[in-house]
Image: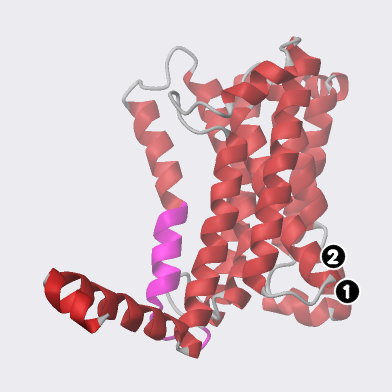
Amino acid sequence: MTPFTDRTERFSALKTATFAGLMLPALWIGWRYGAGDLAPLPVKEALHLTGLWSLRLLVICLALTPAQRFLAWPKLALVRRMVGLGAAAYAGAHLSLYVVMQHFDLAQVASEILSRRYLQIGLLALLGLAALASTSTDAALRRLGARWKTLHKAVYAITGLGLLHFFMQAKIDVSAAVLLAGLFILLMTYRLVLARRPVSASRALVFAGLAAAAATLTLECAWYGLASGISPWRVAAANLHIVHGPRPAVLVLATGLAAALAVWVRAASKTGTMKRIWTCLNRRSVLDRRPASARSSAG
């Protein structure tokens, strides 16, 4: 099975589009490097970008399973493995660029990792990703049996470690780290709600969106307060202004509500609810366009 075909060896437009999408960040980083757009420290900037894309792909990979279920789109299972392998590939590039930054001095690399906690956490996450990537084949699935699923549940802990590494190295501006952490919390809360209560997917997404937005805001306020001494109230107030763009908590809430709306619309279209709503709206529109005398006589 290639990146362009499904299990029956037929061409898959979804897999092809996914493969192209996975390649785009690398091509974009390479183009910016060649154009001198990553100056003054191009290798360091490329290092940060590859790490960022690794975490983005991990969060997307975790989102594919619930999306496959509540959108009733089973073909998403075809690309989940590809996205996970993409996350591992960008993480590997991230480490390779760090080695380049240290002028290929492996002793210096080892010394830096041993002396810096955030590097140790990042390496642990990378080793976990490597273990999952190496066991992502059909042969590994058959060989490990029931243990395969248990092993691959470690992706949640690995994502958490990767996010912690991101926070610790970001130092000043943690907006991107907070956003990814908020989306991760959204996904985990959604899974927890469905596991504990027999509610619809749309209601679970609304609750998860609200809870994750609150957790994201708390995390952002706490991090800036502890790391930079900025007043938590000042950070919270910034979420009410969108002059410089929406803050992570707002984006997390919007994501949860948008997903809930998409699920509700799909369910309503299957049950005929959307058709009835559309009929009522059309009927009201026709009545509103009638002359006032006709409307009064009809009343």
- 223 is higher (above) or lower (below) than 157: above
Q: Is residue 200 left or right of residue 100?
A: right
Callout 2 secondary element: helix
Residue assigned mark 2: 151
Q: Residue at the location (59% across, 36% down)?
A: 248
Return the residue nearer the eye: 135 or 122: 122
- Going by the numbered disc 2, the residue's amino acid type is Leu
Q: Residue at the location (64% across, 27% down)?
A: 98
Is residue 238 highlighted in magenta? no
Q: Is residue 79 left or right of residue 185?
A: left
- 96 is higher (above) or lower (below) than 276: above
- 29 is higher (above) or lower (below) than 134: above
Return the residue nearer the eye: 270 or 277: 277
Determine if residue 189 is in view: yes
- Going by the numbered disc 1, the residue's amino acid type is Arg
**Label 2: few (<14), some (14–19) or many (≥20) C-alpha neighbours in 10 Å:** some
Image disc number at residue 147: 1
Determine if residue 106 is in view: no
**Where is residue 198 shown, x and y percent of the image?**
79, 77
**Where is residue 264 shown, x and y percent of the image?**
54, 73
Return the residue nearer the eye: 204 or 16: 204
The magenta-colored residue range is 7-22
Alpha carbon separation for disc pair 1 and 2: 6 Å
Circles 1 and 2: CB atoms closer than 8 Å:
yes
| Res. 14 image quadrant | bottom left
| Res. 224 image quadrant | top right
Image disc number at residue 259: none
**Where is residue 254 shown, x and y percent of the image?**
54, 49
Magenta span: predominant SS is: helix
Callout 1 secondary element: helix
Q: Is residue 264 left or right of residue 269?
A: right
Q: Residue at the location (45% across, 24% down)?
A: 244
